[in-house]
Image (cartoon, rainbow, N blue to C red):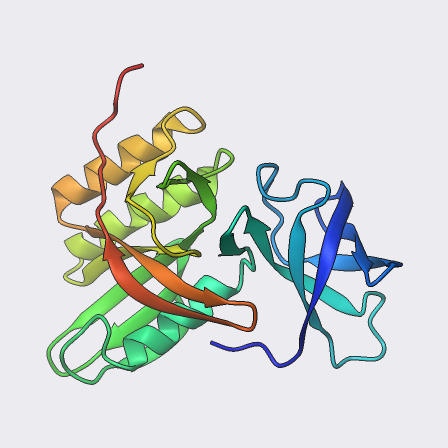
Amino acid sequence: MKYAHTVRAVFLERPNRFIAIVDIQGKRETVHVKNTGRCKELLVPGAEVILEKSDNPARKTAYDLICVYKGERLINMDSAAPNQAAAEWIRNGGLFPEKVKVITEKTFGNSRFDIYAESEKRKAFIEVKGVTLEENGIVRFPDAPTIRGVKHVEELIRCLEEGYEAYLLLVVQMEKVLRFEPNWKTHKAFGQALVKAQQAGVRIMARECFVKPDEMNISREVPVFLEEISE
């Protein structure tokens, strides 16, 4: 997936989860943050960020904050990007060997899954989670408790029971990471749900992304470690 028009800026502060104050070539600007998560380890004062300029002149904010540099590592933090990149990747044969019809936002039971893929051979539900939390090359999800995320994982087990294939695709919005782990400290129930789902037959997989200031595409498979490590 690509962005049409991007510019660089410096992050100054985040008054609330929806907006940030940035410096664009010496001018203070209020921008929309395309991620309502905490992202405290990413949005630190002085960090270089990437903005996408909106083509809607009626908007209150002219830019969306989509990427941030954490040291030398560029991290896409646009919460809409993982679903878009995943849909493109699946349509282009990244997940299944045969051509599949891809439907986004498909309802099953009490949940709406990000992607439904169908061919003559299979019917599959895929839930997508974007991962931006990284420490020493290890990426984790979630960065805050997510009851909704636990519900989605449990509903994937129900998909299996109804005869569908079920996948949880963790889209790591950066490159060159070592492995994925559940964020046991932040939300143990989510990690437990992943273990239960894997044991039931849900395929848990992680993929890192090739990230540029104006682009993000799914690339290399990332090892998934679900075992809880005692500290």
Going by the picture, which residue comes out furthest to the front?
72
Does 229 sit above or below residue 9?
above
Does 40 sit above or below residue 88?
above
Residue at 85% over, 66% down: 60
Is 223 left, or right, of 25 in this rendering?
A: left
Is 1 left, or right, of 65 in this rendering?
A: left
User: x, y percentage for residue 12?
Assistant: 78, 46
User: x, y percentage for residue 140?
Assistant: 38, 39
Is 158 left, or right, of 15 in this rendering?
A: left
Does 82 sit above or below residue 6?
above
Going by the picture, which residue comes out furthest to the top?
231
| The quarter of the displayed image where residue 96 is located | bottom left
> Foreground residue, 181 or 73?
73
Q: Is residue 123 visible?
A: yes
| The quarter of the displayed image where residue 105 is located | bottom left
Q: Is residue 19 visible?
A: no
User: x, y percentage for residue 196?
Assistant: 20, 36
Going by the picture, which residue comes out furthest to the right?
27
Is 161 left, or right, of 36 in this rendering?
A: left
> Foreground residue, 41 or 121?
41
Residue at 13% over, 49% down: 201
User: x, y percentage for residue 64?
Assistant: 70, 64
> Foreground residue, 135 or 189?
135
